[in-house]
């Protein structure tokens, strides 16, 4: 295994409650050729104080402050400051296993590999209660993944390690607000256009979901996901039937995913809009049709149907 410096970039915004737990899982990595870049995106709490204490204690930890501009702009500042040949992404509320980097770095011995990801668990925190969902048994896609990731995002952001040269080829993370929340997938698609994707087929991190997660806002995430696909379709105009089919499936899967989420959250108006978009692309898709029509029913009827369904599934 060739030895490469890994730059771990952590965007932070008002992270005083979670930063210490995350940092502790990074500093004990068994792969020790690392630097940790703490990028403060204009925090107003004790984030700076906590981060500076880490930077003073460890010679390979660096603190940088910037005006608030979003997670993508914070990652981009981290890219400018990074000295490593490999870039690892980590949010301020993620928990890494000690062997994460040790298991991922060797896959970059293949010079065609641009990105390595892994499995992850999800920890839900609500009203002080924690529930961990194990995502270890999942399908891992590798190799030429451009068409697959156009269809759906299978790469968990904070499992990712990226070859630094990829950014020279495809540029920085898109930092416009219209793509906030899917700027990561936008980057994965661009990388997959030119490089192989590899996976460590096991859980290496725990992703924490709490009330402050941007990804909990379904309408914003829907708009962001569509903006991502719109921009990709302009950057990489379809040149084959595979391109056309993959992009069409990408739009369909996006509308179906957020339609179901919005329906579950009882936002029936926007859910119907999503199912209407899926039916435009697949007019005989029975699931979309059933949910679209159900969105017109009174709430007591929807609840009744849910109760009946729950007895059989």
Image (spheres, rainbow, N blue to C red):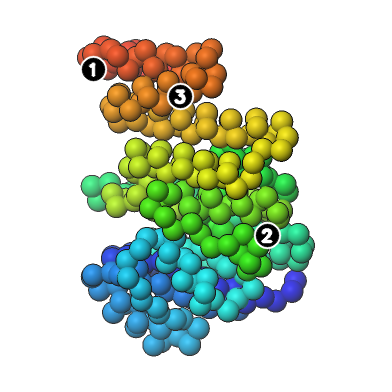
Q: Residues within 10 Å of mark 1 (few under 14, many from 20)?
A: few
Query: Splitting the image into 4 quarters, where does residue 166 fall?
Result: bottom right
Q: Looking at the image, is mark 1 or mark 2 nearer the viewer?
A: 2
What secondary structure is found at the residue carrying circle 3? helix
Mark 3 or 2: in front is 3
Ranked by sequence position, the earlier of labels 1 and 3 is: 3
Q: Is residue 269 above or below residue 59?
A: above
Sooner in the amino-acid sequence: mark 1 or mark 2 = 2
Q: Residue at x 37, y 12 (%)?
A: 293
For the residue pair 89 and 41, the one nearer the viewer reads as 41
Write the residue at 70% across / 54% down: 194
Examine the rendering and report whether any part of residue 267 can be seen: yes
Q: Which residue is mark 3?
A: 277
Label 2 neighbour load within 10 Å: few <14, some 14-19, many 20+: many
Q: Is residue 243 left or right of residue 32?
A: right
Residue at image coords 40%, 72%: 39
The numbered dot on residue 101 is none
- Residue drawn at (77%, 62%), measured in percent from left and top? 110
* Label 3 environment density (alpha carbons within 10 Å; few <14, some 14–19, many ≥20): some
Marks 3 and 2, the one that precedes in the sequence: 2
Q: Residue 114 shows which numbered tag?
A: 2
The N terminus - image quarter = bottom right
Residue 102, given in percent of the width and then of the height, sits at 63, 68
| Disc 2 secondary structure class | strand
149 on left or right of 286:
right
CA separation in Å, label 1 and label 2: 48 Å
Real-space Cα separation, disc 1 to disc 3, in angstroms = 23 Å
- For label 1, the SS is helix
Quadrant showing the C terminus? top left
Instruction: Give the residue pinned by disc 1.
Output: 299
Choose mark 1 or mark 3, whichever is in front. 3
Q: Nearer the viewer, residue 216 or 19?
A: 216
């Amino acid at each position: 295994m060739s030895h490469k410096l890994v730059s771990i970039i952590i965007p932070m915004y008002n992270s005083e409650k979670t930063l210490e737990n995350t940092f502790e899982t990074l500093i004990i990595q068994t792969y020790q050729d690392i630097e940790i870049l703490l990028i403060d995106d204009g925090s107003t709490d004790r984030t700076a104080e906590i981060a500076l204490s880490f930077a003073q204690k460890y010679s390979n930890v660096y603190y940088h402050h910037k005006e608030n501009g979003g997670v993508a702009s914070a990652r981009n500042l981290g890219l400018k400051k990074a000295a490593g040949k490999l870039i690892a992404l980590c949010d301020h509320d993620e928990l890494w296993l000690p062997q994460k980097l040790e298991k991922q770095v060797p896959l970059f011995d293949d010079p065609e590999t641009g990105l390595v990801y892994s499995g992850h668990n999800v920890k839900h925190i609500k009203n002080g209660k924690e529930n961990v969902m194990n995502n270890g048994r999942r399908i891992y896609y590798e190799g030429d993944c451009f068409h697959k990731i156009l269809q759906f995002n299978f790469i968990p952001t904070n499992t990712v390690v990226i070859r630094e040269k990829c950014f020279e080829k495809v540029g920085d993370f898109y930092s416009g607000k219209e793509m906030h929340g899917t700027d990561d997938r936008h980057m994965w698609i661009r990388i997959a256009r030119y490089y192989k994707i590899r996976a460590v087929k096991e859980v290496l991190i725990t992703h924490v979901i709490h009330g402050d997660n941007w990804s909990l806002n379904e309408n914003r995430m829907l708009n962001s996901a569509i903006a991502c696909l719109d921009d990709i379709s302009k950057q990489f105009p379809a040149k084959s039937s595979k391109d056309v089919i993959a992009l069409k499936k990408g739009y369909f899967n996006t509308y179906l995913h957020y339609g179901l989420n919005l329906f579950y959250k009882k936002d029936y108006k926007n859910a119907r809009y999503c199912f209407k978009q899926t039916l435009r692309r697949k007019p005989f898709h029975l699931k979309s049709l059933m949910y679209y029509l159900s969105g017109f029913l009174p709430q007591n009827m929807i609840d009744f149907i849910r109760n009946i369904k729950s007895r059989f599934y």
